[in-house]
Amino acid sequence: MSDSEQEQDLNDEKFTVIESNDGFEYVVIKSYALEASKMLKGMLDKESPFIEAQENRVRITDFTGSVIEQICLYFYYKHKYKGETVVPTMEIPVDLLLQMLIASDYFAC
Amino acid sequence: MCASRPRTKIRAPRRGLTGDHVDFDETWGVLAQSLREIHSQNASRLSFEELYRNAYKLVLKKFGDRLYQNVLDLISDHLLRVGHDDVRPLKPNSAVSGNGLFSGSAELERREAGTRFLIGLKRAWENHLVCLRMINDVLMYMDRSYCSDKDIPSIYVAAMGLFRDKLLYNQDFKVGETLNKIILDQIRMERDGDVIDRNSIRSCICMLDALYESDKELPTEKLYLTRFEKEFLASSTEFYKAEAEKLMRECDTASYFRLTSKRLKEETDRVQAFLCAATEQKIVRVVEKEMIESNLKEILKTETGLVQMIDNDKYEDIELVYRLSLRVDKDLTVVKSICKARIIEMGKELIKNLGAAGETNAATGTASSSKTPTESQNITNQTLLSIDWVEKVLVLKDKFDRILEQAMSKDGGMHIAFTQAFSEFINDFNRSAEYVSLFLDENMKKGIKGKSEAEVEAILDKAIVLFRYISDKDRFERYYNKHLARRLLTQRSISHDSEKQMIAKMKLEVGIAFTTKLEGMFRDMNVSDDLNAEYKAARAEARNASSSSAPKKVELTVNILTPTHWPSVSGGLPGEETQTCTFPEEIKSIVQDFETFYMSKHNGRLLKWQPQLGTADIRATFAHRKHELNVPTHSMIILLAFNDLPDEDPTLSYEQLKTITSIPENDLKRNLQSLAVAPKSRILIKKPMSREINSTDVFTFNKDFQSKLTRVKIGLVQSNRVETEKEKKETDEKVEEQRGHQIEAAIVRIMKQRKTMNHADLTHEVIGQLSNRFNPEPTLIKKRLESLMEREYIERVEGQRSVYRYLVSFPALIRPSAAMLIV
């Protein structure tokens, strides 16, 4: 995807940017993220007046890029297997397991 | 440890997130500031993530309870401020005092003040919702872990409760009470025809619908239901009570119902516009109860009420009455009773008119001329009246059929009620069976002339409707038989097809037993026709064979009647009273000829002549011209007696005539009366001239008889007419007697099958079996039972007074009267 296109999609609010505390940025399809995380939903929902919704950019102060990356992967994973009965286990690096546990609680997903 | 993953190590979560010391006051300070920003609608500068993170931390560090409490406090403070600063000042004073003494302009002002208040409250509510949503989102983590762990209401629910307690029903503000008063006030204004701001009310109603009495949020505890709806229904009840009273005073029934219908529509409309759907039924019920149910009887019975609508065929009004009554009264008891009463009243009116007209006729009759013709004239008049009566009943029936169809959507219950009412008044009148039969007679003789098949069918169908109403079907049968017999014998029936159609219809109604005699009559007529043709052919042949050129002077047509099918036509069953007379020679020979012919065809039958039923056409030469006379057979015999008299003494005395003709005295007198007394057909001259026929009278042939017609019909050919009281009494007696036999037959039939049976069941069964012919009186049944016991058909079972047993009958037990039992 070219930069200009990406820019376009960001303006269209198809995508949103999630930024970690160590400076990594993840561009994800917004609807997938909102679907999975209640916290992001409250934050970015159309009616939300908060600054994140206006800028379409979320800064997560408490998690590093490696965790956010897994979280984003989870958004796509969840969307992909939505409604299916046979779902393969999502592989999560073992060293991140505990942090992922906390993150999932934080993101409410 | 597994060798394949030697270096894998679970990294501990970063301490930075959870491990740091968190100072509640500091963090709360930040949060509280932000929440206040939210309340003052300044959220756009706030970072959701920051708020979320702070709340998250506080909960994680076990400050959940303090956070929860602080947030609620903050919200309460805000709501109190809103209530104090924004909502309370909008409270209109008048609505609170609400004593209803306002002039027009004050009312307008009151309405606007009310609307302002509603809008203000609506704004406060909407703001609260928006803020609460944001706060709820931000504090999501608290709801999820703290509230659900502790099993306390979520912040959203609790804040809703705060809105209720701190603002709406805060004792200092009295916002809730004012709200109810204003809404009710506005609804009342709308009911009075003003235009109000429905939107603002709608928002406030939605608010009440979204709030609950407690944090449990039970669906039955919506504030709308607990605080508003009751009051609304109560005030509506009051309003409609007054409204109904006012309308009852001011309007006629039709407008009352129209207005009520309009009110119902308005209320439904109102509920849809700004109240909760669940209220619709309740408020409609209020209107129905106050406007219709409580007053239904009264309003329908005013002089502009249902009766008047019926009389004037106001279908639309009746339909409205029907539909609205149906709402409060599934069985339509009131409407039914009024309609029934009206039908019966109208029916009785017709019967009364009938009596009155008959009497006036009788009165004028006696005044104008002497007795004998008056009676017959009177009878003729009454016959016309009776036919007229039946027609009027049919008109009445048509009227109510139309009402049923056009105004009552063919309601089955109403149909039954109408039918009951019709049968009631028809059966209440003891001559209806006779009259209906006369009506049919009239139609069969004249009415259906020149009508298409469909029209005839329609008339017959109407007659069948009346037939259905008559409960004494056996009585009708008797009259119909009699009338039909006379129609057939005097050849007055226009169309045999129609006759048969009618019989078929009756058969369909009450079964084959009812019409066997009628059909038998037709069979007899057909057989007779064939027989006559055969006889004619045989005679012609005989004449040719004997080659005698004697002109055939007399032509004979005979109707062979089976005695059981034919009712007494004049005086007793044929054969019961043997009617003899001496035929003149020329007739006698031909009669004998026919008898021989008939016996050759049907050996062993007994042929009895019933000359009193026949007619004869004779050609007579008078001084001026020849006339063809159509006379009864008996008259013919009398006239023929004058044929052979010597010119010098062309007279015959009464006694002579009696000897020559040997016609029974009654018949002789009547025939002579029509020949010698009736002014238009005076073929004989009687001396002395008087109206009565006496045994001393002397008769001469009137050569100078004159008439404009070539063909003269002379008397006695009675058409069917109303019975005189005496005849009616006879008929009644016969009907009673017949009923006795039928009841006995039914009892025997039933007992034969059941062997033993108790009295009540037996009576019930007998009534059931006979109900399509007549309604047997229980006393009559009892009498017949006793008679049967006397004749040992049945006996009482010992020890059980009310149980009967059938005794197996053997021939010795069958007495002569048993022959009557075969039905």
Image (cartoon, helix red, strand yellow):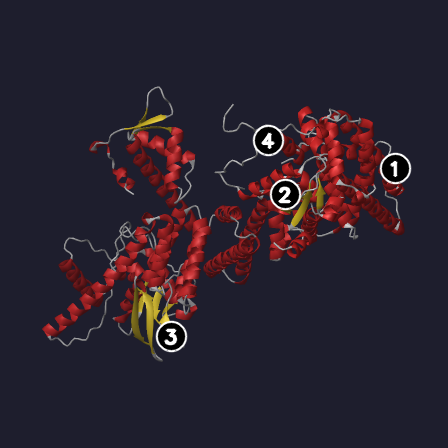
Q: Which residue is mark 1?
A: B84
Measuring from the top left, give residue A1's x and y in whole percent: 61, 54
Q: Do discs 3 and 4 belong to a common subunit? A: no
Q: Name the subunit of mark 4.
A: A
Label 1, label 4: how far apart the Cα atoms are: 57 Å
Spot occupied by residue B476 in the image (x, y as percentages of width and height): 40, 50
The residue furthest top is B799
Distance of label 2 from label 4 (alpha carbons): 24 Å
Residue that label 4 marks: A95
- Which residue matches tag 3? B705
Which of the 4 quarters of the picture holds residue B528? bottom left
Which residue is farthest bottom? Answer: B624
Q: Which mark is residue A33?
A: 2
User: Both on one chain, marks 1 and 4?
Assistant: no
Whether the residues at callouts 1 and 2 have beta carbons within 8 Å, the answer is: no
Task: State left or right for residue B556 relative to residue B321.
Answer: left
Mark 3 belongs to which amino acid? Phe
Closer to the camera in the image, B60 or B716: B60
Q: Dot 3: few (<14), some (14–19), or many (≥20) neighbours within 10 Å?
A: some
